[in-house]
Amino acid sequence: MGTTKTEAFTATDLLLAKYAKALAHPARVAILRILLERQSCICGDIVEELPLSQSTVSQHLKELKEAGLIKGDIDGKKVCYCIDEQAWKQAQQMLQVLFSNYTPCGTNCC
């Protein structure tokens, strides 16, 4: 297998790609919506909201946590998750900058 050559990209592009990858699954988007609505949530409560097994939800939570979009605090045997406010604002700003750089090209585009 070849290397990904990530060193050829800016730190900003790598971070934005990390956030985008975390957002690239509908289950993760649904988890984020739940956390945004409730402010914080125990893993078991998230499982009750989604048509997925506990282990699958845990894997998606792990991906979101590794991307930095959420954080989790252990309380006994339970883990309470919430949005990581700093990373959330950073991801929001980075996506906003990317999308705002678009200018329509008129009828001469492909």
Image (cartoon, rainbow, N blue to C red):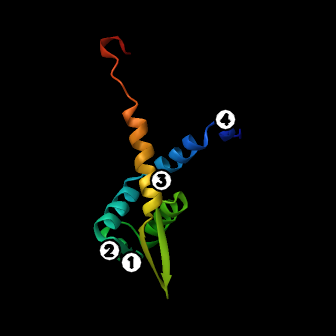
Q: Quick one: label 1 or label 4, which is nearer the N terminus?
A: 4
State the mark number for residue 48: 2
Under mark 2, the amino acid is: Glu
The residue labelled by disc 3 is 22
Label 3 element class = helix
Query: Residue sitting at 42 percent across and 54 percent down?
Result: 89
Amino acid of disc 1: Gly
| Residue 56 visible in the picture | yes
Q: Which amino acid, mark 4?
A: Ala
Along the viewing direction, whichever of 92 and 34 lies nearer the viewer: 92
Q: Please name the residue shown 46% across and 52% down the image.
A: 90
Residue at image position (30%, 12%) is: 107
Location of residue 101 by image quarter: top left
**Real-space CA distance between mark 1 and mark 3, rounded to the nearest whole angstrom:** 21 Å
- Asked if the residue at tag 1 contacts the one at tag 2, i.e. Cβ–Cβ closer than 8 Å, the answer is yes
Estimate how packed mark 3 is, as few (under 14), some (14 to 19) or many (20 or more) residues with alpha carbons within 10 Å. Answer: many
Q: Name the residue under label 1.
A: 44
Q: Give neighbour class at mark 4: few <14, some 14-19, many 20+ (Cα, 10 Å).
A: few
Crowd class of label 2 (few under 14; some 14 to 19; many from 20; radius 10 Å): few
Q: How crowded is mark 1: few (under 14 residues within 10 Å), some or many (20 or more)?
A: some
The circle drawn on residue 84 is none
First reached walking from the N terminus: tag 3 or tag 4 = 4
- Callout 4: helix, strand or loop? helix
